[in-house]
Image: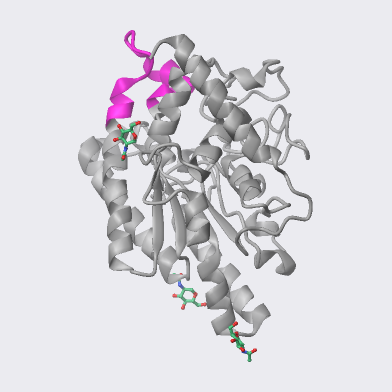
């Protein structure tokens, strides 16, 4: 597509996205009773603030466009998880696990942790992080509290089966593991294909655990175009391409195996409704649009924003806020297209709006 057409397409999509968020009803009833969030820095709302790690975003200029300012979110404004919560008509953001109170946990909790991965060792060179395995153990602890508070196992099980669960994890198993041969052994041990196989096999067990913990409507995000992030481009160079193609090639088998896994989980567990969100298709659209690929903030060598530095004035024109993380406007597009998919390629077998009604 020519650039002009892409721009037009983007304006249209953004218009659709903003309309969805525009209908912000006061006192609206949420479309589902509860919403639980698992993942990495793409959804972290402050879980890493208490950890000793370089992977934290609780300083300016993060949060510059967020109503509460700096919270630990790795972007200028709202995350994908925040925006999906809004589309579900929740009128509050979901508390980080460590601070969630008894009265909040029946509606949902955010377990996301920057630098975390499917594999436990992922992100360890940066310091503390809550791996997906630990997020699932934390969820189990939340459920113990909930069963105790609600005093009625049947009721709580029914409640949990109606919630939306989102899982957005796996990028760090590349960025902060496989692509760092000096810190991690994985790239010395496995081909990219074998690594994807091993990752997806572990992910399969973890997603089954989420099901065993009562989850039924589970939204699983594939990985985006990691080779197109400004940080990876500056580390590896592109040889004239717009992106680091070797990285996109390494990640592709993960996505290609994840989608059939989702179908298999649905097949093996007839009351489950897992769905796959294709971030490659959504982010290739963003990349193609001609939005700036330059980070909005001044980045450190590790790709995060340097503290207290100036940011670009027009944040609606950039895909990336720092070297890795999307801006709020990019998050708007991702959330909106996972909620109401424009093409069956974006979300299958269901988009979130369909999942809500099942
Ligand atoms: C959840 O916790 C219970 C104990 O409270 C334990 O028996 C069970 O194995 C745990 N499940 C998972 C998946 O961690
Ligand atoms: C427990 O919850 C179920 C499902 O909501 C309900 O039918 C049942 O009456 C409840 N039991 C008690 C003792 O309240
Ligand atoms: C994601 O969408 C792109 C098209 O935009 C397609 O080429 C790719 O095969 C899709 N990935 C999966 C795993 O379905």
Q: Residue at x 37, y 18 (%)?
A: 243
Q: Relative to the observer, which residue lies in front, 46 or 204?
A: 204
Magenta stretch: residue 235 in it?
yes
User: Picture quarter containing residue 185?
Assistant: top left
Task: From the viewer's perspective, tell me whether residue 4 is left or right of residue 255.
Answer: right
Q: Residue at x 55, y 40 (%)?
A: 335
Q: Relative to the observer, which residue lies in front, 86 or 22?
A: 22
Q: Residue at x 50, y 50 (%)?
A: 352
Q: How many marks?
A: 0
Q: Position of residue 5 (x, y in %)?
A: 46, 14
Whether residue 66 can be seen here: yes
Q: Position of residue 189 (x, y in %)?
A: 22, 40
Task: From the viewer's perspective, tell me whether residue 339 is left or right of residue 316.
Answer: left
Whether residue 140 can be seen here: no
Q: Quadrant of ligand 3?
A: top left
Q: Residue at x 58, y 32 (%)?
A: 16
Q: Position of residue 30 (x, y in %)?
A: 66, 58
Q: Position of residue 251 (x, y in %)?
A: 32, 34
Considering the whole magenta stretch, tell me its main secondary structure: helix
Magenta stretch: residue 356 in it?
no
Q: In the figure, 131 relative to 314: above or below?
A: below
Identity of the residue furthest to the top in this view: 240
Task: From the viewer's perspective, tell me whether residue 17 is left or right of residue 117.
Answer: right
The color scheme shown is one colour
The residue segment tinted magenta is: 227-249
Q: In the figure, 331 relative to 349: above or below?
A: above
Q: In the figure, 25 relative to 17: above or below?
A: below
Q: Relative to the observer, which residue lies in front, 347 or 310?
A: 347
Q: Quadrant of the N terminus?
A: top left
Q: In the figure, 278 relative to 321: above or below?
A: below
């Amino acid at each position: 597509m020519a650039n002009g057409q892409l721009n037009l397409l983007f304006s249209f999509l953004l218009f659709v996205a903003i309309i969805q968020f525009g209908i912000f009803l006061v006192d609206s009833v949420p479309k589902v009773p509860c919403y639980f969030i698992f993942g990495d820095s793409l959804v972290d709302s402050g879980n890493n603030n208490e950890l000793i790690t370089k992977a934290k975003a609780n300083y300016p200029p993060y949060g510059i466009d967020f109503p509460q300012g700096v919270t630990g979110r790795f972007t200028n404004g709202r995350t994908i998880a925040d925006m999906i919560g809004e589309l579900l008509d929740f009128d509050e953001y979901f508390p980080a696990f460590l601070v969630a109170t008894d009265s909040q946990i029946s509606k949902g909790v955010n377990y996301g942790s920057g630098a975390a991965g499917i594999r436990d060792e992922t992100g360890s060179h940066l310091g503390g992080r809550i791996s997906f395995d630990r997020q699932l153990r934390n969820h189990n602890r939340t459920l113990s509290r909930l069963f105790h508070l609600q005093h009625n196992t049947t009721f709580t099980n029914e409640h949990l089966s109606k919630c939306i669960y989102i899982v957005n994890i796996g990028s760090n198993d590349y960025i902060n593991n496989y692509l760092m041969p000096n810190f991690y052994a994985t790239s010395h041990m496995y081909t990219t294909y074998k690594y994807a196989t091993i990752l997806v096999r572990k992910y399969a067990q973890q997603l089954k655990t989420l099901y065993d913990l009562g989850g039924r409507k589970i939204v699983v995000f594939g990985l985006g175009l990691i080779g197109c992030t400004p940080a990876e481009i500056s580390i590896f160079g592109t040889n004239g391409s717009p992106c680091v193609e070797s990285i996109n090639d390494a990640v592709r088998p993960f996505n290609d195996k994840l989608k059939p896994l989702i179908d298999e989980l649905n097949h093996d567990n007839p009351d489950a409704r897992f769905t796959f969100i294709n971030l490659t298709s959504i982010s290739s659209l963003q990349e193609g649009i001609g939005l700036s690929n330059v980070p909005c903030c001044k980045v450190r060598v590790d790709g995060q924003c340097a503290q207290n530095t100036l940011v670009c004035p027009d944040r609606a024109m950039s895909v990336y806020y720092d070297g890795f993380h999307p801006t709020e406007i990019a998050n708007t597009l991702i959330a909106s297209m996972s909620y109401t998919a424009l093409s069956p390629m974006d979300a299958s077998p269901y988009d979130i709006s369909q999942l809500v009604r099942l």
